[in-house]
Image: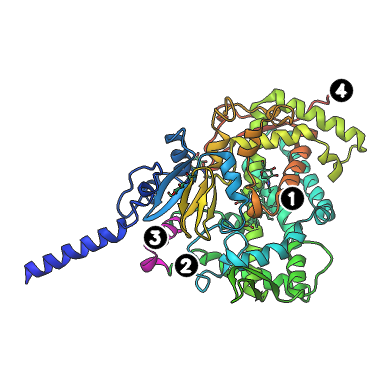
């Protein structure tokens, strides 16, 4: 009796062990270098126990294997590939036949309908959404909404005026979160959120809640990945789903379900809906003759709410972190700050002393400063694609199967001294096209690359530059004593800059 139970138990354990390690010869068979994987965790134990985020894990694979173009690893039992060569990375990112999938989340739309968003979806739903939403981010639309952004930069200046007069110190991150939430509120939702005067509007709270990588959410995600059969039903976005749905319905009702002419995201979604079902050629299915099948997907409330969610979630943290990081670096680099200020003064003098889309577009050095901030700290950390159909990775002649995830270690590229010498130094001049090398151009990808690159790159860039120009036109920033030049970014909010009224540069 007992012997049978023990034998069955052992057989069960052996079967489980076999199941969890069944793929572990995947990279060996292909002659790809990799670290030894562990049962259950693969090479992801540090992430599972929250000792390292995925950016660190991807960067570690990059650093440990110099000389390789690709490095294998295992996320739990699934084989993954890290691309170490920038040119190969761009080749993969632009290969829309094999690598149009992001493979972002284990998706169960019935459980997490907000995951039907442009960032997370794959295949036909992604293609149809991407082509319908692209027009909303054209430069024409951006110019049309720019006055709304400029209004928010004036509020930013007013707030800083008070801070400077009272000789207070502030946290750059909080400041730029407030600015960004106001911009998103205005250009996205037609909401006058005014975070810059009130400290904690409901709108800002929602933004922070969406981006909180809290303990429970990380644990749930990890469980879903490692043992999908058992934990696949866990809901990840539970807390915010009702709020987003509710907000969308209210905003749409206020407009009687018709675009209002404000050119914001709500209008854009209403316009998308008015065009009827999204139709096109399938990128995954073919008919009997081998031609792509026709596909058609309805823009229903669930899909619209999911897009509203992602415009908020993808725009909030990336923009506020990258803008505050640039400001933080400028505080630590007074020479570069002064150069930026001289340029701002010079350009504004030509433009009637008013910030405008055209004026900001002329601020080349300021753009280099922002680029350099994103080089040191690219907010996304790494990019991911999933192999959609069997293929051979070019140059290295390694075949991979559908479903294999491919990671591009952006943070590691940007901070590799072989690509960007003395990577910890803040040097905006690196982006002077006269000196930027071909390899640096390939390796620099804070907004991603290829067909799945950031749909709002221009908007993200221009709203950040507008904020930096507004601050530096009237104020100077200095580091608060003791604040390090390279702060951990998953830090608690800290006071890190001091704002003073800028001396007029003659
Ligand atoms: C400085 C600000 C921003 C940065 C650094 C940034 C960065 C990124 C990155 C790295 C990706 C992944 C690209 C890839 O996989 O190749 C991405 C995708 C995306 N971003 Fe941004 N982003 C910013 C602002 C925004 C804003 C303001 C919005 C929306 C209002 C937005 C919406 C999106 C969406 C929807 C995607 C997914 C596109 C797709 O899969 O087709 N981003 N962004
Ligand atoms: C690529 O690999 C395949 C199988 O692994 C092999 O048959 C082929 O000769 C290789 N091609 C090149 C160009 O190395
Ligand atoms: C992708 O990278 C290439 C090479 O650096 C660049 O020319 C191209 O503009 C990039 N595309 C996008 C969408 O970022
Ligand atoms: C990942 O963790 C490291 C510290 O281990 C931190 O410096 C980095 O900013 C984190 N990355 C992201 C994207 O949060």
Q: Which residue is mark 1?
A: 459
Task: Give the mark toward the camera: 2 or 3.
Answer: 3
Q: Which residue is mark 2?
A: 235
Badge 1 vs badge 3, beta-carbon distance below 8 Å: no
Badge 2 vs badge 4, beta-carbon distance below 8 Å: no
Secondary structure predominantly adopted by residues drawn in magenta: helix
- Cβ of mark 2 under 8 A from ligand 1: no
Where residue 462 sits in the image (x, y, percent)? 76, 45
Residue sitting at 55 percent across and 28 percent down?
Answer: 418
Where residue 340 sits in the image (x, y, percent)? 76, 30
Q: Which residue is mark 4?
A: 506
N-term-proximal mark, 2 vs 4 = 2
In the rendered image, the vertical position of residue 154 relative to residue 313, given as above or below: above
N-term-proximal mark, 1 vs 3 = 3
In the rendered image, the vertical position of residue 473 relative to residue 77, given as above or below: above
Residue 302, located in which quarter of the rendered image? Answer: bottom right
């Amino acid at each position: 009796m007992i012997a049978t139970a023990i034998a069955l138990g052992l057989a069960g354990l052996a079967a489980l062990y076999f199941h969890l390690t069944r793929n572990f010869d995947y990279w060996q068979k292909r002659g790809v270098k990799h670290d030894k994987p562990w049962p259950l965790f693969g090479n992801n134990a540090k992430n599972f126990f929250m000792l390292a985020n995925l950016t660190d894990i991807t960067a570690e694979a990059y650093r440990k294997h110099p000389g390789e173009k690709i490095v294998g690893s295992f996320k739990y039992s699934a084989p993954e590939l890290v691309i170490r060569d920038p040119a190969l990375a761009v080749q993969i990112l632009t290969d829309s036949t094999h690598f149009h999938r992001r493979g972002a989340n284990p998706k169960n739309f019935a459980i997490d309908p907000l995951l039907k968003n442009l960032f997370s979806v794959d295949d036909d739903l992604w293609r149809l959404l991407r082509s319908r939403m692209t027009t909303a981010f054209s430069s024409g639309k951006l110019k049309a909404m720019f006055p709304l952004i400029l209004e928010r930069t004036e509020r930013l200046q007013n707030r800083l005026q008070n801070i400077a007069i009272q000789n207070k110190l502030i946290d750059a991150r909080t400041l730029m979160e407030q600015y960004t939430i106001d911009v998103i509120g205005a250009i996205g939702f037609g909401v006058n959120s005014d975070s810059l005067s009130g400290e904690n509007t409901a709108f800002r709270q929602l933004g922070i809640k969406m981006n909180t990588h809290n303990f429970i959410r990380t644990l749930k995600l990890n469980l879903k990945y490692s043992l999908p059969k058992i934990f696949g039903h866990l809901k990840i976005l539970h807390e915010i789903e009702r709020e987003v749905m509710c907000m969308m319905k209210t905003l749409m009702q206020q407009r009687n379900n018709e675009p209002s002419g404000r050119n914001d995201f709500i209008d854009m979604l209403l316009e998308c809906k008015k065009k009827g079902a999204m139709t096109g050629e399938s990128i995954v299915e073919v008919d009997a003759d081998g031609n792509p099948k026709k596909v058609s997907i309805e823009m229903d409330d669930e899909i619209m709410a999911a897009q509203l969610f992602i415009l908020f979630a993808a725009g909030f943290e990336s923009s506020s972190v990258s803008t505050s990081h640039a400001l933080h670096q400028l505080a630590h680099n007074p020479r570069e700050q002064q150069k930026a200020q001289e340029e701002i003064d010079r350009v504004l003098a030509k433009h009637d002393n008013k910030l405008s889309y055209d004026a900001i577009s002329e601020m080349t050095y300021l753009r280099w400063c922002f680029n350099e901030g994103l080089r040191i700290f690219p907010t996304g950390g790494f990019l991911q694609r999933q192999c959609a159909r069997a293929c051979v990775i070019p140059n290295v002649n390694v075949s991979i199967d559908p479903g294999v995830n491919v990671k591009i270690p952006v943070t590691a590229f940007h901070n590799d001294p072989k690509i960007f010498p003395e990577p910890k130094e803040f040097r905006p001049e690196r982006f002077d096209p006269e000196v930027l090398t071909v390899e640096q151009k390939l390796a620099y990808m804070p907004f991603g690359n290829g067909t799945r690159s950031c749909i709002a790159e221009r908007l993200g860039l221009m709203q950040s530059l507008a904020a930096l120009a507004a601050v530096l036109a009237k104020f100077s920033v200095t580091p608060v004593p003791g604040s390090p030049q390279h702060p951990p970014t998953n830090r608690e909010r800290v006071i890190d800059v001091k704002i003073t009224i800028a001396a007029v540069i003659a």
